Image: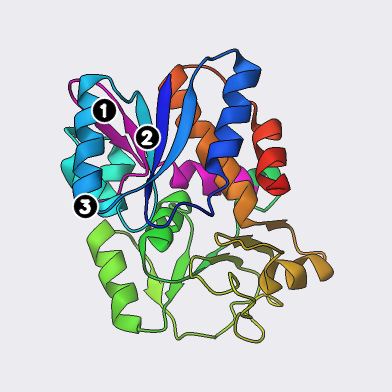
Amino acid sequence: MKLALLGDPVSHSRSPAMHQAAMTQLGIEGTYEARGVDRQGLEKAFEDLRSGALDGANVTMPHKMAAAKLCDELTEESARTGAANTLIGGVRVTGAFTDVHGIVAAGAAAGIATDQPVLILGSGGAAAAALLAMRGRPVRVAARHPQHGGELLERLNAPGEITPWGIPWQGAVVVNATPLGMRGESLPDGVVEAASGFIDLTYGAVPTPGVELALSLDIPTADGLSVLAHQGAKSLELWTGLEAPIELMESVARSQ
């Protein structure tokens, strides 16, 4: 089986080691390579997916929306968000958006309540995944540019309210769908402290300040590596039809 990660940059990614370990444990012979690609390289990868030179691929920034447009078929979640992070090869390439599953599964693994309102920080692709993952619950979206939050709700035709950036919501589950924390930045004062649960979609070489704060307050917390592992496990299951070894995948992701 030949798999790849498509994006720019990709040299920092933990996905190759994570997937290679999972394939070995499942007895699958194959490779998972990181390909740094521009738009032309992305289109070449689609040729490989259709010819059988690639069996599947993950897509990371900045190509998730472009990949969705190049697909022949899309899952419901991929169609709604206009993004694809998982590509299933064949004469017709199917695009899926397993980030949604990653958020749901990581939250469940951390014991985060599923009946509380949700405060989503951000308005980009990660926020779109969070919005679908939290559907059916009261949602507020806080973006540093409020109009972008409104555009997100409109694009997904999703119910929700726009709230000013930095305003806490007591008892809500907070989902950080911004890059804040990747380089040691803190979230606005009071936002994490008021949360009943915290899901951080970003990660760095060390735990983000938001994750450290939430854990210090005994708030149920799922970090970006847990989300990464769970979305990757879903991708592997779509490619192989086999149950992915999630504990191994998360352990490898954390060891890189």
Residue at the image point whose x is 30% and y is 44% from the top: 78
* Disc on the earlier residue, 3 or 1: 3
- Which residue carries the number 1 mark? 49
Q: Which residue is more in the foreground, 48 or 240? A: 48
Do the residues bearing badges 1 and 2 touch, measured as CB atoms within 8 Å?
Answer: yes
Q: State yes or no: residue 89 in magenta.
A: yes
Q: Which residues are magenta?
A: 82-107
Q: Which residue is more in the foreground, 242 or 175? A: 242
Q: Is residue 186 left or right of residue 36?
A: right
Looking at the rendered structure, the kind of residue marked 2 is Ala
Residue at the image point whose x is 16% and y is 33% from the top: 72
Residue 9, how many percent across, how many down?
A: 42, 57
Q: Which mark is residue 160?
A: none
- Which residue carries the number 3 mark? 39
Residue 33 higher or lower than 237, as above or below: below
Q: CA distance from mark 3 to mark 1?
A: 15 Å
Residue at the image point whose x is 61% and y is 68% from the top: 172
Residue 35 higher or lower than 173, as above or below: above
Q: Could you tell me which secondary element the residue under label 2 belongs to?
A: strand
Residue at the image point whose x is 50% and y is 32% from the top: 234
Q: Could you tell me which secondary element the residue under label 1 belongs to?
A: helix
Q: CA distance from mark 3 to mark 2?
A: 15 Å
Neighbour tally class for label 3: few under 14, some 14-19, many 20 plus, Cα within 10 Å? some
Looking at the rendered structure, the kind of residue marked 3 is Arg
Q: Which mark is residue 57?
A: 2
* Disc on the earlier residue, 1 or 2: 1
Q: Could you tell me which secondary element the residue under label 3 belongs to?
A: helix
Q: Name the quadrant of the N terminus.
A: top left
